[in-house]
Amino acid sequence: MNASEIEKLWEDVKKILETEIPVSSYDAWIEPLEIIEYESNQITLLSGQAIAVEYLKKNHYPKFLEAFKKVLNKDIIVIFETDKETFDKIKKAKAKEEKKEERKIEKAQQKEEEHKKAIENLGYVQSMNLNLKYRFDNFVTDENNKMAKAAAESVASNPNAQYNPLYIQGGSGLGKTHLMQAIGHALINSKKIQCVKSEVFINEYINSTARNKDSNKSNLMNKFRQKYRNIDVLLIDDIQFFEGKKQCMEELFNTFDTLHLANKQIVLTSDRLPKDMPEMPQRLISRFEQGLVVEIRPPKEETRIKILENLAKSKNLKIPKDVFCYIAKNYKTNVRELEGAFNKVEAFASFEDTDITLEFAKHVLKCEERNELNIEKVAQEIAKYYGITVEDIKSSARSSNISNSRKITAYIAKEYLKLKLEDIAKFIDKKHQTVIYACEQIKEKLNKDNKLEKEIKEILSILNLN
Ligand code: ADP
Ligand code: MG
């Protein structure tokens, strides 16, 4: 018999003895015994106390013989030995072993729990519209977005402490949704969260106010309010979509106040600053500004390269660095477009079953290299930035957006490209006095107008001129 078979034999015998010997005696004298040996019809049992051995020999010896006989189907001799030191050593070793075993089981249980939770979370993450891609650990920072990330991390580790609401502002594709959802992920196990796009919130609200034959209107509204008010953290993406929708802004206002009063965390994103949404009522704007407003500006070139490197790494792709540099140089204002350009190159390489090289990326993207900056390119970027066309800049249209873009083009061409006034005037098709006036106006405004200062800073960064 091997060691575990002998142990098993002893367990079986103890089960029999347990039924035949009074519990108190059994617990005191038999349960602690250790089986040491089973050799040539002889079993040796060890005790730590001489008195126990004496007691058992005197009172229960025949029961031991019978029990062993029952289990083994043969007669054997039972010998009791007393050796306190060895006995203690065995008990100690056994206890250690048991602890180890317990720990093992605990660990296995813990793993199972974690696994279960992860699966549950996955469902939760999906039902919350959280994208697993958007986490803090894969958000690349530089001076243009580090404040926003730090604020988001602060909210994630300490909701409703310092920044409530947290309002994240930035242009399209600069990581607003990414940061907002990262907060959601960080809090998913400890808080009840709702993450919603503004359009969805608006649609759900409208649906719950609609007259519906089959369902009770107030029930629908209750359900809607329950969903967005009976929570710890509300994340609303692209808040600018509420602008001008009167009823929806009212509902947003009430939701906001209910949560805020109950000390619940609110996080909002928008492509505009609160004060740059003219149709938003003042009471909403002041609430948006009540916590912390952080801005995300377009990432620097090295950040864009890092984002692409990470993307390639996450897809297990080995790509030469000059490809990342090329794409990063040509996609400056929007990380979504930057990633899109990379994905396009990857998809084409996969269709054509070829390696991704700089030549290949150039062939796919056909980007114009922008090393040589001229007034045409400056105007192109400014037009893109303000959502107009170069033709608008060259036109005589006088709307404030276009006229502003024209003045900024003149200003940058004069101050940064150091172009002659005549050349600038020719480009924008105006007199050269107009150029002088435009530049002076921008210079003067720059000292007073923070919004303009910020915009020009961003444009200069896009043009790599700062
Ligand atoms: P926004 O909501 O501001 O329009 P998103 O958060 O949707 O932009 O970001 C667009 C894409 O760019 C996403 O895939 C996002 O993961 C990625 N992205 C943006 N900024 C960063 C960054 N700093 N680091 C890593 N990925 C980024
Ligand atoms: Mg977004």
Image (tube, rainbow, N blue to C red):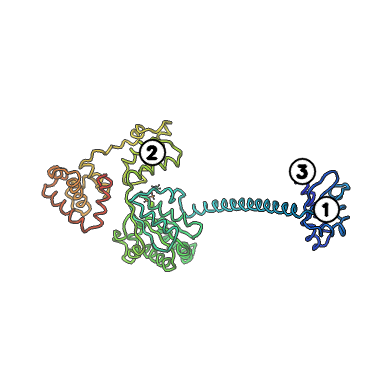
Is ligand 1 closer than 8 angstroms to the Cβ of mark 2?
Answer: no
Q: Is residue 170 left or right of residue 435?
A: right
Q: Secondary structure at mark 1?
A: strand
The span from disc 2 to disc 1 (Cα, nearest Å) is 82 Å
x, y (%) of residue 34? 77, 52
Identify residue for label 2. Answer: 344
Say what amino acid the circle numbered 1 marks. Phe
Identify residue for label 3. Answer: 2
**Residue closest to the far bottom:** 261
Q: Are marks 2 and 3 in contact (CB under 8 Å)?
A: no
Q: Nearer the viewer, residue 73 or 90?
A: 90
Is ligand 1 closer than 8 angstroms to the Cβ of mark 1?
Answer: no
Mark 2 or 1, closer to the camera:
1
Residue 212 can be seen in this image? no
Q: Secondary structure at mark 3?
A: loop
- Give me the residue at 36% from left, 42% from top: 305
The span from disc 1 to disc 3 (Cα, nearest Å) is 20 Å
Q: Residues within 10 Å of mark 1 (few under 14, many from 20)?
A: many
Identify residue for label 1. Answer: 80
Residue 113 can be seen in this image? yes
- Give me the residue at 32% from left, 64% from top: 281
Q: Nearer the viewer, residue 61 or 419?
A: 61
Give the mark nearer the N terminus: 1 vs 3: 3
Mark 1 or 3, closer to the camera:
1
Q: Residues within 10 Å of mark 3 (few under 14, many from 20)?
A: few
Mark 2 or 3, closer to the camera:
3
Say what amino acid the circle numbered 2 marks. Lys
